[in-house]
Amino acid sequence: MDASLSSDDLKFREEVRAFFHNAEPEAAQQLINNPRTYKQGAVQWQKKLHEKGWIAPFWPKQYGGAGWTVTQSYIYETERVKANAPDVVPFGLKMVGPVIYTYGNDEQKARFLPGILSSDDWWCQGYSEPGAGSDLASLTTRAVSEGGDYIVNGSKIWTTYAQYADWIFCLVRTDASGKPQQGISFLLIDMNTPGITVSPIQSINSVHSLNEVHFENVRVPKANRIGEEGQGWTYAKSLLAHERTVIARVADSKKRLNTLRQIASRELQGGQPVIKDASFRHRFTNIEVELMALEYMELRVLAAMARNESPGAESSLLKIKGTEIQQALHELTIELAGIYGGVVLDDGEPGSSVGHDFGDSARKDFMYGRASTIFGGSNEIQKNIIAKRVLGL
Ligand SMILES: Cc1cc2nc3c(=O)[nH]c(=O)nc-3n(C[C@H](O)[C@H](O)[C@H](O)COP(=O)(O)OP(=O)(O)OC[C@H]3O[C@@H](n4cnc5c(N)ncnc54)[C@H](O)[C@@H]3O)c2cc1C
């Protein structure tokens, strides 16, 4: 792709900057940073984007997308991070939304897409189970046909923000007789249906975002099944490729790298700014170079997606490199925080810190960041995908 900006692109960049200037993204980000006001902040921000017509720029125009070019998406993302503006919650907008408009029927599109765009419906992802993570096809949550409904029994785990969700998109087993990948169906389930319980899992950063979701004789209309019965694996795979592309988070890492540069220029070690230390510089510049390479890889994938090509196995490359870079940045930042990076303040309020002003966030980011090489399909599994589909091994 051509990465230079045309006069239209420059005009668009001004529009994006003006929007972020007026929309008070930092106030929304503050609400999001506080676990008690997380959902309120996310919904408030997303409604502003919706009003502007920018909530799902990557969707086809006919379903409410903005019809942006790849360069416009890139500009938006770069400016978003510069303005400290929140990213959207991915489960509705970046995961199930594209599955519904690609594989759903007209009634399903009319029923579900508006609530995703307006953020009136909060979605969560019910793929993983206590006995099915990397080997997702071994999932055992059963959906048994009964007239016009399915009766669902089983459990999902690690379900992010299920405590807020109105809807869950689920992989369920409708047939156990063939190969594991066959006989899986893709269901949209109303979280208010009798028989669903959500139990919290406290994560290492002291935040409650993870849950177990249990289904006991949950009645789900067959009208809520996406596509064909038994074809859920195909739909699930297309969603995962998009999910992995999202996880690379290049613009966020660029911002983090700049913040780290500022901290290292200000923090002293042996009377000298840390940035002058040869070993620090070596690690810092290694990350910088890798991030630059990742950015170009991401642009290539985005350009392919703009030509309506599926991100495919390239999304696995992005996921591996993107998450390794995120973790390397977290590690360098927490090293700079030193012992203050280990101080845990009991109230869970963001912004409170002892010693360095970045100590508390460095610790939380470092701890939660360990998960990035696991979620969206672990990095080892992504390497298996690359071995098979890219290298043909
Ligand atoms: C913070 C967080 C949020 C999440 N959110 C959600 C969510 O919202 N919805 C959802 O459905 N799931 C979610 N997940 C689940 C996530 O997708 C799984 O954790 C992930 O797929 C790994 O599965 P597992 O935890 O069962 O680990 P396992 O599959 O048991 O893997 C354990 C280890 O073995 C390795 N391994 C396994 N198989 C192979 C193999 N064939 N070759 C090489 N190495 C292998 C793995 O890489 C890993 O290191 C989330 C997970 C985390 C950590």
Image: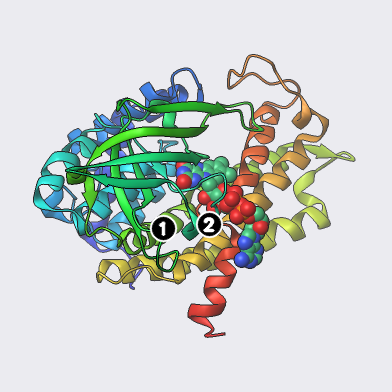
Task: Please report contact status of discs 1 and 2: CB closer than 8 Å, yes or no.
Answer: yes
Judge whether 337 appears above or below 318 on screen: above
Residue lying at the far bottom of the rendered structure: 392
Tell which of 52 and 202 is nearer to you: 202
Q: Which numbered dot is residue 377?
A: 2
Q: Which numbered dot is residue 177?
A: none
Rendered residue at 31%/42% (across/down):
92
Q: Looking at the rendering, which quadrant does residue 230 occupy?
A: bottom left
Given the image, on which type of amino acid does mark 2 rest?
Gly
Task: Answer left or right for 197 relative to 157.
Answer: left
Q: Indicate how the structure is coloured in the image.
A: rainbow
Q: Which numbered dot is residue 240?
A: 1
Rendered residue at 34%/50% (across/down):
95
Residue 223: image x %, image y %?
17, 45
Given the image, on which type of amino acid does mark 1 rest?
Leu
The C terminus - image quarter? bottom right
Residue lying at the far right of the rendered structure: 270
Rendered residue at 50%/80% (across/down):
390
Rendered residue at 52%/68% (across/down):
317
Judge whether 330 appears above or below 215 on screen: below
Judge whether 167 appears above or below 323 on screen: above
Which mark sits nearer the N-terminus, 1 or 2? Answer: 1
Residue 56: image x %, image y %?
25, 46
Ligand 1 is within 8 Å of the C-beta of the residue at disc 2: yes
Tell which of 32 and 24 is nearer to you: 32
